[in-house]
Amino acid sequence: MILMSPPCQPFTRIGLQGDVTDPRTNSLLYILDILPRLQKLPKYILLENVKGFEVSSTRDLLIQTLENCGFQYQEFLLSPTSLGIPNSRLRYFLIAKLQSEPLPFQAPGQVLTEFPKIESEHPERNRIEAENKMERKKIEPNICSDKSRPCSGKETILFKLETLEEIDRKHHQDSDLSVQMLKDFLEDDVDMNQYFLPPKSLLRYALLFDIVKPTCRRSTCFTKGYGSYIEGTGSVLQTTEDVQIEDIYKSLTNLPQEEKITKLLMLKLRYFTPKEIASLLGFPSEFGFPEKITVKQRYRLLGNSLNVHVVAKLIKILCE
């Protein structure tokens, strides 16, 4: 079996999209070059990368190589939300098996956005998964913010830099009972003082935060910049239960800076701890880092990781 996660930078939407011309693709191109010349081919292959890989020239070369070597394959765009985990982490996956017969769920030319159903799995779980297929599997936007009240149409109050569509989608995500609440992944016996956002960050980035509560069923993708940068790096947690975020934000507009900070501090916003992020990524409870690894380094390592449960499920499907 070959498990690989080639460098994603050549395929990211915010990068230069160098694709096959980017030197960081060379390691994958080398594998594709030697694969047909191996005396004994691997029986299984699993590859992970970012969304965007599926429309790259490198992907086309990968598919051509697999077909020439006699592999049956299927491509996916999957997020942990498909498994009931409250974290958006959309990734491209490809599984390939060395056999002449097509895979039972194979859909040539299609990138699936759902896990295929395995007959050996619990039928009730399959039914729930099917019922919750919905449009929520347009999981590309890693969107997350606090929305504890129903919002729709003209009733929605835009108190941050977001659109009506985004707010409605967030509310829909929080209403999806097939996904666990964040509180199931939170630590409760750790000193959180080092994780609270400082006043300077609260004031500067107030309109950019993706804010969630423990009762939310969503969070954005945590990147390696989490804890160092704000925008697009992951959600922050509101730890006060008796304060409505809408009430805080509606009152900010005409306040002087000091009063704005006082208002925002009422939310008690904090970063998720590395342990909590690891839990959302599917790492076991006994997983931990060496003490010499700083919090910043832990965030960077986790941001470059992938979801253990998603990969485990794909391996199980592949080996059926």
Image (cartoon, rainbow, N blue to C red):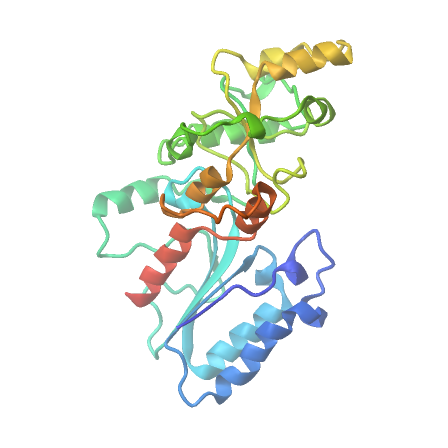
Q: Pick whichever, 226 or 36, lies toward us.
A: 226
- Seen in the picture, residue 96 relative to 171 is either above or below; the reply is below
Q: Residue at x 76, y 14 (%)?
A: 257
Where's the C terminus, which quadrant? bottom left
Query: Looking at the picture, how far across and down is residue 227, in whole percent?
Result: 62, 37
Query: Looking at the picture, how far across and down is residue 89, in whole percent?
Result: 51, 46
Q: How many marks?
A: 0
Q: Residue at x 23, y 57 (%)?
A: 119
Where's the N terminus, which quadrant? bottom left
Image-based side of 205 in relation to 63, left or right: right
Q: Pick whichever, 70 or 239, lies toward us.
A: 239
Query: Looking at the picture, how far across and down is residue 285, in whole percent?
Result: 36, 43
Q: Residue at x 66, y 68 (%)?
A: 24
Toward which corner of the image does residue 195 lie, by quadrant?
A: top right
Q: Pick whichever, 224 or 54, lies toward us.
A: 224
Q: Pick whichever, 110 or 320, lies toward us.
A: 320
- Residue 145 visible in the picture: no
Query: Looking at the picture, how far across and down is residue 259, in whole percent?
Result: 71, 9
Q: Residue furthest front?
A: 292
Q: Residue at x 59, y 61 (%)?
A: 53
Image-based side of 262 in relation to 221, left or right: right
- Residue 121 visible in the picture: yes
